[in-house]
Every structure is written in structure tokens, then in C-alpha cells.
Image: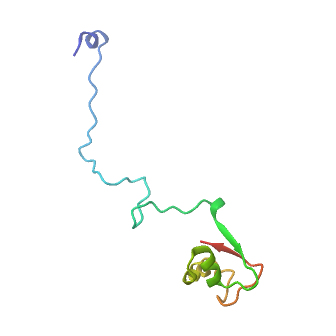
């Protein structure tokens, strides 16, 4: 202890014990996805919609939006409440785009 500590009667505070802390994860941070990045859904303002036009099909929409017509199932799954049959979509339908 120094002279000033004696004058102000300061006592040494016990130091915190971090011996049980492990590295590599956090209990409050989101867990990374399989690719190593944190998967977070887009905010509501960024959610996309698409209005069906005459001549559209789910595969054409998927090709236009994703660059791959085989990803039509993603659009269908996101819109099951609206689309009863994936072969029958109608102009004016507003689809949610995942």
C-alpha cells in the first residue's frame, strides 16, 4: 500500500475470478449459421413482394428473381396460403418473395 492509500484508508478490492470462463461462444450473441455467418431475417421493410403478371409462372418468377427457375418451390412454400395449386397463379396476385 502506498502512503496515500494509508491516508484515505483505501482497501484493496478483491479481484474478480474469471477462472470458469471459456472462450469460443457467447450466450447472448446469435449462433452462426452453417456457413459461419450469422443468419438473421431481413427487417420487415426489406421483405419483397411480386405482383403476378399475365404469362407468369412460379418458375419464370424464380428465374427472374433468383436466376434459377428451379427455385420456384421457395416462392410456393412462402405463399401456400395464397397459392393452392403451384400451376395456377393469377395476374394481380401479390406474392411474398423469400
Which residue sits at x=28%, y=10%?
4
Instruction: Check the image and report above or below for 87 versus 25.
Output: below
| Colouring | rainbow
Instruction: Check the image and report above or below for 49 versus 23.
Output: below
Q: Quadrant of the N terminus?
A: top left
Which residue sits at x=28%, y=47%?
21
Instruction: Check the image and report above or below for 49 versus 15.
Output: below
Q: Position of residue 89 (x, y in %)?
A: 71, 85
Which residue sits at x=55%, y=63%?
41
Q: Position of residue 81 (x, y in %)?
A: 66, 80
- Along the line of sight, which residue is nearer the eye, 1 or 30? 30
The tally of labels here is 0
Q: Position of residue 3 (x, y in %)?
A: 24, 9
Q: Position of residue 60 (x, y in %)?
A: 64, 82
Left or right position of 15 against 37:
left
Instruction: Check the image and report above or below for 52 versus 49.
Output: below
Left or right position of 92 against 74:
right
Q: Quadrant of the C terminus?
A: bottom right
Left or right position of 91 against 14:
right
- Along the line of sight, which residue is nearer the eye, 19 or 69? 69
Q: Quadrant of residue 48?
A: bottom right
Q: Quadrant of residue 8?
A: top left
Amino acid at each position: 500500500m502506498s502512503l496515500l492509500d494509508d491516508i484515505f484508508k483505501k482497501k484493496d478490492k478483491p479481484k474478480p475470478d474469471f477462472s470458469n470462463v471459456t472462450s469460443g461462444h457467447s450466450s447472448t450473441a446469435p449462433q452462426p449459421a452453417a456457413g459461419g455467418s450469422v443468419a438473421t431475417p431481413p427487417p420487415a421493410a426489406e421483405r419483397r413482394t411480386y405482383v403476378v403478371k399475365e404469362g407468369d409462372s412460379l418458375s419464370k418468377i424464380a428465374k427472374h428473381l433468383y436466376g434459377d427457375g428451379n427455385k420456384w418451390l421457395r416462392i410456393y412454400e412462402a405463399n401456400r396460403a395464397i397459392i393452392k395449386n403451384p400451376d395456377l397463379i393469377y395476374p394481380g396476385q401479390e406474392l411474398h418473395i423469400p
